[in-house]
Amino acid sequence: MISVRDLWAGYGREPVLRGVDLRVEHGGFLGILGPNACGKSTLLRVLTGVLRPQRGEVRVGGLDPREAAPRDLARVAATVPQSTWIPFPFTGFEVVMMGRHPRLGRFGRPGPQDRDAVRRAMAGTDTLGLAERLITQVSGGERQRLVLARALAQEAPLLLLDEATAAMDVHRRIDAFDLLDRVNAQGTTVCAVMHDLNLAALYCRRLVFLKEGRIRAEGPTERVFRKEILEAVYETPAEVSVHPATGRPHAVFLPRARRGGN
Amino acid sequence: MTARPGRVILGIALVLPLVFLWAAGIGSSGLGSADLLRALAEAAGLVPPVLDPVDRTILLTVRLSRVCLAGLVGGGLAVAGVVFQGILLNPLADPYTVGVSSGAALGASIAILAGLGGYTAWGLGLLPVFAFVGALAALGAVHLLASDRDFGSGNTLILAGIVVSTTLSAGISLLKSLNEDSVSSIVFWILGSFNGRSWAHVAFSAPYVFAGVVWAWCLGRDLDLLALGDESARQLGVDAARARRWLLVAASVMTGACVAVSGVIGFVGLVVPHLLRMVLGPGHRRLVVGSFLTGASLLVLADGLARTVLPGGEELPVGVVTALVGGPFFCWLLRWSPRSRGAGSP
């Protein structure tokens, strides 16, 4: 679904990504982790054609984001951006319908098929109640759910998320990832840039750790979600255990002052 | 949302012919709206001709062409306003923000100064042609200034527009000071008027206006997505820089064609999109249709007022009427109106 070889990219002269190699298979569920400014969002920008790479080869669903028309790319990859602020008072329904844009012709109007896709996406994200609300008047978390619904309505085989649940309440966050899990089970490839490590460990089957523009570790969650790797990436003492309730690895970061204390 | 967009647009569409009829009934020759209907029916061969040929000429050539031109220009400016506000992401933008009007005014001033103002061929004359070329030149200059890498954000375009506009206005002032005799002609032209225009003016501007309206409608959803910012727009399949460029060209050419035949008529392109956004919401396809119809009605109405307000058949420049009515109205809009649609909902 995604293949990246020797990718260098950034803003101005200083590259943010310094030689990234990555493959994501069809149907994968990948978490992209790493401290701030490690290049997570830059990677998504390159994958969606927003940022032109300085060097390297990128393929997304067989398309080169540099060459492909935005429309074609948007049919392959749907994105939930970090910033979901929309300054104009569109209704929730209108916002989600925007996800159908790449599937509508220049003269086309949304048909029953499009409305169905929008309703399904809204039902899945529990946003049907926001259909008539104005996007300028809903909370940050509600907005993120609507924008997630917009991406789902795109019905693309690849879903890219950039901190897509950061503003949501805990239960909404779990709801959202349960939904992503279901969508993934139906064949959609999911790549999520995340801050919440334990949430990532809970849902992602593979993880990639970025630091200073390079990949520090990549592989199945059980294999890379380890104390040594977390400590190296975040430069903070950590403990990793398998959580008894979930059976998934779970990290706790320790205050530096108490390291090795009683 | 309180109003149903479809019904609002239908309502506006029904008002338009009434305003047309009212405005076409205004004049000194004692012919009213009913006579226009009669003349139209005669021209269509529906009723036997009984009207005096001179009256028929007045109705079908002078009056009808005037209201049609006012409608065309009003609709065109309103749609151009919608597009400019959309691509610049600025609700205070209007069709003249990027300096197209200054270009047209400079072109017209040159024509007037060169003594070509009175020259007419095919009922049109060279003045609109000069003005239109001036508008296109201003557009070209803005385009060059703003198109370095990613075809500018809204702010780049606004700044480029200010630069071009200021420079061109200086040019107009220079021309005025070089030849004081032409000052009043230039000033009067810039104020805007439909006096003495003909079907040739309609034919000159109509293709650009209609093409622009259709183009704006077709790119309506792209305009919606531009509101999300360039990055999100691209991720939803819209090349923002490219869409912005073509919309800028379309709206500017449309504005240039309107200004060329009428002068610099203000406020229509600012107030109408604003007002309609409050009623119809931010979706641009609806806004384009609604603004075209509303802009047309309003400018025909304003032109009717311009011809009737002063006693003794004196006529005000229509630009003065739109500014006198539009200015205070815009104040109200800014200061006291509900800020967005659905203000009553939680």
Image: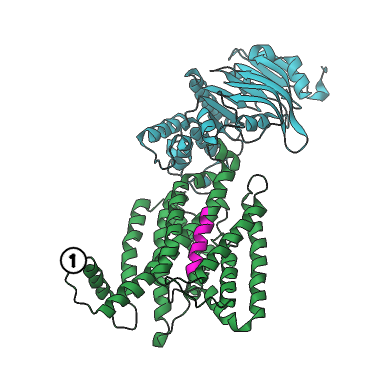
Chain colours: A cyan, B green
Q: Is residue A219 above or below residue B236?
A: above
Q: Nearer the viewer, residue B327 or B118?
A: B118
Q: Is residue A217 above or below residue B114?
A: above
Main secondary structure along the magenta-highlighted residues: helix
Disc 1 residue crowd, few under 14, some 14–19, many 20+, Cα 10 Å: few
* The furthest residue to the bottom: B312
Q: Which residues are magenta?
A: B250-261
On whether residue B203 falls in the magenta region, the answer is no
Which three-letter amino acid code belongs to the residue tagged 1? Leu
Q: Is residue B187 left or right of residue B204?
A: right
Q: Chain of mark 1?
A: B
The structure residue drawn at horizontal position 45% and vertical position 42%, both measured from the top left corner, is A94
The residue to which callout 1 is attached is B46
Q: Nearer the viewer, residue B137 or A49?
A: B137
- Horizontal and vertical percent position of residue A258: 81, 22
- Horizontal and vertical percent position of residue A8: 72, 28
Q: Nearer the viewer, residue A63 or A164?
A: A63
The reply to whether residue A188 is visible in this rendering is yes
